[in-house]
Structure formats: structure tokens, C-alpha cells
Amino acid sequence: MSNENSEHTVHSNEGSAQSPAFQIVSAILLAVLGTTALYFELPGWGLILTAGLLTAITAVDYLKSRNNKKSEKAPATQRIGGLS
Amino acid sequence: MHIDVVAAFFLLGALAQICKAPIKMPAGLYQSLTLFLLVAIGLKGGIALSQYGDEKLLWQSVLTIVFGAFLPFIAFPLLRRFGGLSRTDSASIAAHYGSVSIATFAVALAIIEARGIEYEPYFPLFVALLEIPAIAVGLWLARDNDQALNVKKTLHEIFLNQGVLLLVGALLIGWLSGEQTQKLMPFFGNLFYGVLALFLLEMGRVSTSRINLLKEYGSFIASFGVVMPLIGATLGTLFSQLLELSVGGTILFATLGASASYIAVPAAMAVALPSANQSLSITSSLTITFPFNVLVGIPLYIALVVKLFA
């Protein structure tokens, strides 16, 4: 019953290793739905705000994984600041 | 922008957590509020069931079970294909999204009652029916796993977890006792909104306290947590037409389709699929989907259904 019962040893972070196509399509879909809802005088602001948040989270996630890839590819000398 | 009064308490809890304000509720009180909501919803549905039970209800119940079993089949390929998650994790999360959140249902119920929108009063029966099939489908989706399934323990968790037991138990008590149950209603009826507000205050705090986990799981789970409710709500609306539900019933069914369990399913999955990442599924259902439904989804489902069907 507890919400705090989430301690676990298995952590799969595979989601962020994938292409962000799903995230981008989702954000566009939410923005379109939100705008359409507003056009029909329905509460669509929440969807537009959520689309903005998703875009920001996806961008941060993408930049982080790109930086990680770059640092993996960089030659050893570069990684230790040319001290060799 | 209009925010419902109960949803406002959720925001207050979230804000308090963000500002690190010390409003943590004692664990015992949170448990008590959960018990109260389960019993109150069950009793209300039971009383209605004693007055409305007919043949139509039987096939509505069968279709509701089909709906609950169907949703994980939508969620599972999305998680596998686009999220690249393991079979076990995908099956576990799919089960969470096929099942329902009673708290989300309670919020939708409180809002439509406050607005005077009519709904089928025996609806808590559908809530109880939707709790279970997704767990069975989730276990089936994870089937080619090496883990041996502890059938006895799993069945115990599926049918005798606190959520199902209290909801079904109160439903039966209300159904069998009929009018006599009215004696309890000053307590379980009049206090419902106040208890829900306190419960949401704590939920706002708890779900915001887990937000840092999103950094760990990446943007896919955040996207899935808002897209899946919209798919579930759309399918719920379509199914409600097959069930010939009223406007209020359609809103509630869409809300149930959109909601994801964070009580009954995690307990069952912890036993049946111990290698599944529980933290990932609870982060998705509690930190993303629950707030999304309370703050964005439910007002939208209500407005859309009223516009389309009223």
C-alpha cells in the first residue's frame, strides 16, 4: 500500500539510450491537441504546458547523452587534458 | 484557468515539497485516509448496486474486464519498441497502466458530483473489476522469463491486496445491507471531500518528492506517462459508448482508462515479477501520470465529453 515501496536493485535506464523520436512526436502531439482544445474553447493550456515541459526534458536528456558519447569517443590524451 | 478545489490541495502539497516546507503527514494518517476513501467509494457503489442491479450490468461488467485486459496490449509495444525497456519492465509498467488508480477516480468523482453531472451510481463495481485483469495480462506478457511464478502468493496479492479487498468488501456490504448502509453515510458520505483533500495534499508532496528520479530514467518515461493516459482516455470514451454509459459515466470511464495503478499493481508485481524495476513503474504512474490526470487530464476529459455527448 505504501508509495515508498520502490527500493530496487535493478535499474534500467535503457529509455534514454533510444532515439528521442517518441518524445518529440509526443510533445508535438500534445501541443497540437492543446491548441485544438483551446480553439474549441476547451481547457488546453495544460497540454501546451506539458508539451513545453516534455520538450525541455527531452532536450536536456539528449544533450546529456550526446556529451556522454563525446567523452567516450575522445582519445585518452584529450580526456586527461593532454598531460601525456 | 479554473482549478478544482480538491486538485488545489494537490498543488499545495507539491508546492510545499518544492519549498521544502515541513508538512509531512504521519504514515498512519495517510494509510487511514486511503482506507476511508476505499470504503466510502465501495459503500456508495454497493448501495447503488442493491437498487440498480440488472442484466445490463452483467454485460457492462464483462466489457469492463475486456477493457482492462486490452490496455496493457497497447502500452507494452510502446514501452518495448520506443522505450527499449526489457520485457519484464515493459510488462510490469503495462500492467500498471491497464489497472486503475482509485485516487484518480475519486478526484473525477468529486468534480463531476460538484458540477451535478449524472453518472451510473454503481460505478465503483467497474473500478473493482478494472483492478485485476491487467495484472494477469502483465504476467502473461512477461511469460518467457526465467523467473518461476509463485502462483499462490501472486493470486493472494492480486485478489487480497488492500485496495481490492476493501473496495470489493465495502461494495458487497453496501449491496447486501442496502438501505441499512445509510446509517454509515453521515461518516463515509459527508466527510468524503475533506478526506480526499487531505489525501491529495499528501499525494502532491509524495509525487513531487520522487521527481528527481526522472533524471535517472530519462525523457522517454516522462513522455510515456502523459501520452498513455491520453490513449487510455480515448479508448475509455469509445468503450463507454459500447457500454451505453451516461455523460458522467463516460467521463469516469475515460478517467479510469487514463489512470495508472500505484497501489494494487506494484504490490502484485513485487511478488510475481521481482526482477521488474518497481521504482521505474511507480515513478511513471505516481510522479507523472497521477499529477497529469489530476491537473490537466480530468478537466479536459470532462469538458470534452460534455461538449461531445451532453
Image (cartoon, coloured by chain):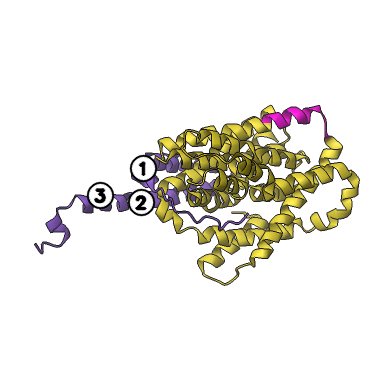
Chain colours: A purple, B yellow
The amino acid marked with disc number 1 is Pro
What distance separates the C-alpha of mark 3 from that of mark 1?
15 Å
The amino acid on which the numbered mark 2 sits, given as a three-letter code, is Asp
Q: Quadrant of residue B164?
A: top right
| Amino acid under disc 3 | Lys
Quick one: label 2, few (<14), some, or many (20+) residues within 10 Å?
many
Residue A7 at x, y = what percent? 50, 56
State which chain disc 2 sits on: A
Pair 3/1: label in front: 3
In the displayed structure image, the side of residue A21 where residue B167 appears, left or right: right
User: In terms of sequence position, does the residue under pointer 3 or pointer 1 come before the other?
Assistant: 1
Residue at 55% in and 57% down:
B207
**Chain at tag 1:** A
Q: On the same chain: label 2 and label 3?
A: yes
Q: Is residue B125 left or right of residue B9?
A: right
Q: CB atoms at circles 2 and 1 under 8 Å apart? A: yes
| Location of mark 2 (residue) | A61
Give, as a single range, the part of the protein colored magenta: B53-63
Residue occupying image coordinates x 60% and y 63%: B12
Q: Earlier in the sequence, mark 2 or mark 3?
A: 2
Identify residue for label 1. Answer: A20
Question: Which residue occupies the foreground of this view, B162 or B143?
Answer: B143
Of residues B67 and B150, which is closer to you in this image? B150
The picture places residue B248, in percent across and down from the top left corner, at 72, 40
